[in-house]
Amino acid sequence: MLDTIGNVLSFSLYEGLVFGFVAIGIYLTFRVLGFPDLTVDGSFTLGAAITGVLIVIGVNPFLATLAAFGVGLCAGLATSLLNTKLRIPALLAGILMMVALYSINLRVMGGANVSLLREVTIFDQVFEWLGLGADVWYAELILAGALVVIVFLILNWFLRTEIGLALRATGDNEQMVRGLGADTDMTTILGVSISNGLVALAGAVVAQGQGFADVGMGIGMIVMGLASVIIGEALFRPRGVARLLLAVIGGTFVYRLMITIALRLGMAPGDLKLITALLVIIALAIPYIQKKVRRQWLPPAAKW
Amino acid sequence: MGENKGLLQLREITKVFSRGTIDEIRALDNIEMDLNAEDYIAIIGSNGAGKTTLLNVIAGVYPPERGGKIIINGRDISGLSEYKCAQYVGRVYQDPHIGTAAKMAVEDNLAMALLRGKPRGLRAASNKQRRDLFRSALTPLGLGLENRLNALVGTLSGGQRQALALVMATISKPALLLLDEHIATLDPKTAQIVLELTEMIVKREKMTTMMITHNMELALRYGNRLIMMHKGRIVVDMNQEQKSNLTVNDLIVAFERASGEAFDDDSILLRRD
Ligand SMILES: Nc1ncnc2c1ncn2[C@@H]1O[C@H](COP(=O)(O)OP(=O)(O)OP(=O)(O)O)[C@@H](O)[C@H]1O
Ligand SMILES: [Mg+2]
């Protein structure tokens, strides 16, 4: 019994950490920039595909993981260029890239999936360095945790720099930012690129953890990431850059915990996306209903 | 640049909206204007006269028609994008929501404003030295904002926000300050406070200023020059001497003579109050 609880917790913690990247990426676009970026479903798989293929042809797994971050950046760059330079609405630009990436991912992998079962991944490398067996329960946590700490520290620093501040301000009041002499096209491009880089990084780590990359593995990432962000915000009510980032990671953990428990209780894996969608709807509806009950004024829903 | 007559020169500034349609409108019609350093110009004119369009063109929101030239400090900035023009031009809008970012702290707003015209890099946006600078910029307002650097701007009142917007527009000392009916949405008492703050900052920083207002008395009382616009043209241009003994009624007569139209008081084109 205790063993099961320990299992569920450590597994959720691991997933909370790796999918935390996706949530942080989604948080950067949807919340910080106010840019509803749907590229994510495609760039997650892109990161997995690139890393998978590179590892299979013998590239060092760390380099392959870094490469995933790089191509993710490029995917985000493409989406944000469509938006800022061709003035295609953000939502549509993201959908276009997501669809295009589906074909690209198939091309990259030369099929629907790539197996990494016999390959040396970053996990194998780290286990070897630490002299740990893969059966030690915290083995995977160490790597995932280290990656999250690195990303957290970098972002926490970056978002407080002069450029990072301009990026945050862009999501709040774009006209003001231009009026104060900062190029909002540049900040948008930067933010959307970094976001997709992180999402692709998550894809790369997840693929190595599960031993394969699959063309369908990114489906639903946006909703999952949004669910994590919303749960994190609701539970922790954070203020300030550092707390927000931590809340997003915490939200991912809680979300993953709920999913893992649902699965253990015998729910069919195919139903999870429906559950997630319902979760997001409920989380979004609660503040609305609260305001409605208190008879507060409510603006009409945003169309984005 | 050779002889540099003034701070701002506008040459053949025309702006046509919806060209080639039945809605075609000549919002600015061949505007020529010279501003000297430390000029403080009040701009009045009926609704749709082109006042906001003039400021938008100067601020680079959209370019003037071909042939138009905007020269600031000897530099031709016509055709530069808005964020590039911003290094020369600080601006306060009618709506305090436009000039400030609600979901960010007072400190963050000021840090954004401080870097106008400077390259933004990977240094920390805010540090002790900058916070001290922000406090000393906010203290003269007398609104207690210097003790609320961490407050979200969305929690400030409209007047406090507009005062902050004014500080943000001037803190990096741009060459030109543009004010577009910046006290129009405030209650009379707050409007008076923000107006006095404007006066104080403009005098102290010796800023060249263009202020749009619908209040004719204000236009007579403040500034060293008064411009009246009508249908995209400048129809009256008075210096300090010419406007010093004028009353609102004289101004209305001047408007009627210059525009060839009767002054329509009912439509509150130019408010007397
Ligand atoms: N972006 C735009 N597109 C089309 N027409 C415009 C645009 N901006 C302004 N106009 C038109 O140009 C004319 C001048 O407008 P402007 O906003 O400059 O007037 P204004 O003098 O500021 O008036 P008000 O006192 O009402 O603010 C108006 O007829 C307006 O309809
Ligand atoms: Mg106007």
Image: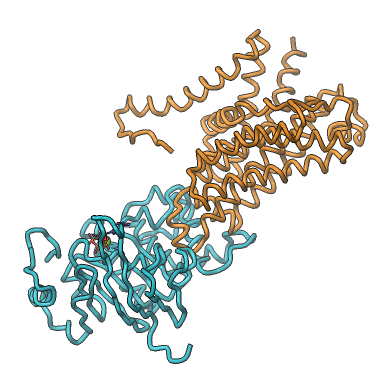
Chain colours: A orange, B cyan
How many numbered circles does the render carry? 0
| Residue A66 placement: quadrant | top right
Q: Residue at x 67, y 25 (%)?
A: A216
Residue B251 as seen in the image, left or right of residue B222: left
The residue at 33%/77% (across/down) is B12
Inspect this view and state whether residue B152 appears: yes
- Residue A104 % position (x, y): 69, 36
Ligand 1 lies in which image quarter?
bottom left
In the drawing, does residue B119 fall left or right of residue B77?
A: right
Q: Is residue A94 above or below residue B269?
A: above
Which quarter of the picture shows residue B189?
A: bottom left
Up-down: is A28 above or below B254? above
Query: In screen coordinates, is B119 left or right of B229?
Result: right
Residue B139 visible, this orientation: no
Image quarter hosting the N terminus of chain A: top right
Instruction: Name the residue: 51% across, 30% down.
Output: A234
Query: Which residue is at the far bottom?
Result: B3
Q: Position of residue A89 (x, y in %)?
A: 48, 43
Q: Residue at x 62, y 48 (%)?
A: A77
- The answer to whether residue B218 is left or right of residue B129 is left
- A115 w.r.t. A107: above or below: above
Front in this rendered view, residue B200 or B223? B223
* Quarter occupied by the C terminus of chain A: top left
Residue A269, percent across and down? Answer: 65, 14
Instruction: Tell which of B155 and A262 is nearer to you.
Output: A262
